[in-house]
Image (cartoon, grey):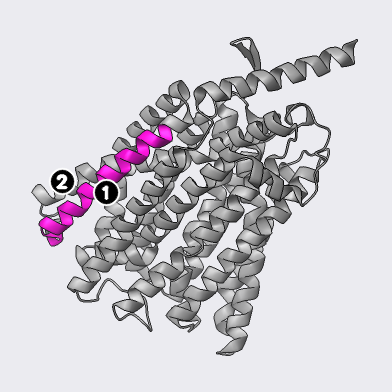
Amino acid sequence: MSANTNNITYNRAKTWQIGLFALNNIATNFYMFLMMYVSYYATGAAGIAVVLISSLLTSMRMFDAVTDPIIGFIIDKTNTKFGKFRPMMVIGNIILAISTLILYNFTHRLPEGNPRVIFFVVMYAIYVIGYTFQTACTKAAQACLTNDPAQRPLFTRFDSSYMLLMGSGIAMYTSSYLVPKYGGFTLPAMTEFSTSAVIASAICTVLAIIGLWEKDREEFFGIGDKGAKVKFKDYLSVLKGNRAIQMLIVSAATDKLALQAAGNSSVMVMLYGIVMGNYALYGKMSLITMLPTFIIILVGTKYASKFGSKKALVATTWLSIIGYLALFLVIFIGDPAQISLDNFGIMTALWIGIYCLANGVKSVSSSIVIPMIADCADYETYLTGRYVPGMMGTLFSFVDKMISSFATTVVGFVVAGIGYTATMPEVTDAYTPALFWATAFLFIGLPIIGWVCSLIAMKFYPLDDKKMLEVQAKLDEIRKDENQALNA
């Protein structure tokens, strides 16, 4: 489907195609959410020390970053009769399913000590390779799905909405089903969790492939390249010469480091289970805030379509900072133990109301960066003539993951600093002032620091709505000239 706007012929996708393809991100996020709880399996069932598992997970995150450029290079060199991206999505999901099921079902059966640790590391490394194959396609395939800057934010609308439903669903699943059924994040709980994640991810992957089916073809690759003539060393020149991807990386990586730490399962246990003394509220809050957050997502993505993704990111980042500062004041000045649906009062009303607004704008600011990567890929074609969406997406992921890899380590060292050296915090633990400040720093302080860095980076990000119009006009002119030459 094409459209002629401002004398530019755009490659546009059908709305349902964008909606289905956005499920590829959800497919991998099922595994991401599952691995947020892997510390409970590793320390509980497998008997690996807290600080050791935190360090191991950080190392694996760095390994994940290293695999990104390699797989991105493979994607850019790939052009099969089944497309460039769909084969990678299938390969990635199969590797994810096999490695995850083996990790959660066999690690604890091995002899204690080094055999368990080594096996855990090996299986997690294989899992990382599969994860990279599939996540790289989420970012890279955006460039061929649609090149209309006004349509690309639709991905954010679908992605944020799915993530809202997914986050609420998993929160309810863990807090209201798994924990009560198994008495905590025990071995049977993690076995059931991992199996459910594998099945759900496979379904989402199939739907995402259907959504991408018509667009994963050569004529939609950049200016019609038949195969990117790039070398591995070109990663350095792309990073050095493309200011847009530089600033987007800084913005997204700092946000992701902070938000991954803030959303860590241990932090949720500390905030809802210990500070508020009501862990079941965690899952219920997700359901309560779903509709308001969804409305904010619709407004935010509409704003992005009209005024550009850059302006939308800046606006929602400012609102996120204000919202989280307000959340801190609620639990610092008031009594967080009074936040309860069973005893609805001013504290509960303030927490729910502010969290609805803050969570909504945060969802937009977090998801809008994915279609912005496609803008950066088009900008690279505009600058150099190279169509390298795989390289662009995985270059982004490489630096992003290297920085955000410290999220688990940050959480591990903070909780160890307040006395949790052998086990992670549990909902039955006693409330202390030290635990309050650790929770406030992880859940509120870190995200605000990340958002401030993001605002600074956006000051130097060149791709506003006017610049993107110029970029697409030039690329459209090149395509038309090449078509005329072929038809002459």
Question: Left or right: where does residue 17 sit relative to residue 357?
Answer: right
Identify which amino acid the numbered label 1 is placed on.
Tyr
Q: Quadrant of the N terminus?
A: top right
Q: Main secondary structure of the magenta part?
A: helix
Q: Position of residue 108 (x, y in %)?
A: 54, 81
Question: Left or right: where does residue 449 sit relative to residue 143?
Answer: left
Q: Residues within 10 Å of mark 2 (few under 14, many from 20)?
A: some
Question: Left or right: where does residue 120 sit relative to residue 160?
Answer: right
Say which residue appears at 73% left-offset and 35% top-offset. Answer: 387
Label 2: element kind? helix
Q: Give the labeled residue for mark 2.
A: 350
Compared to residue 266, the image places residue 49 above or below, namely below
Q: Quadrant of the C terminus?
A: top right
Write down the quadrant of residue 361 in the picture.
top left
Identify which amino acid the numbered label 2 is placed on.
Leu
Q: Give the labeled residue for mark 1.
A: 324
Q: Position of residue 481 (x, y in %)?
A: 80, 15
Q: Position of residue 123 (x, y in %)?
A: 64, 71
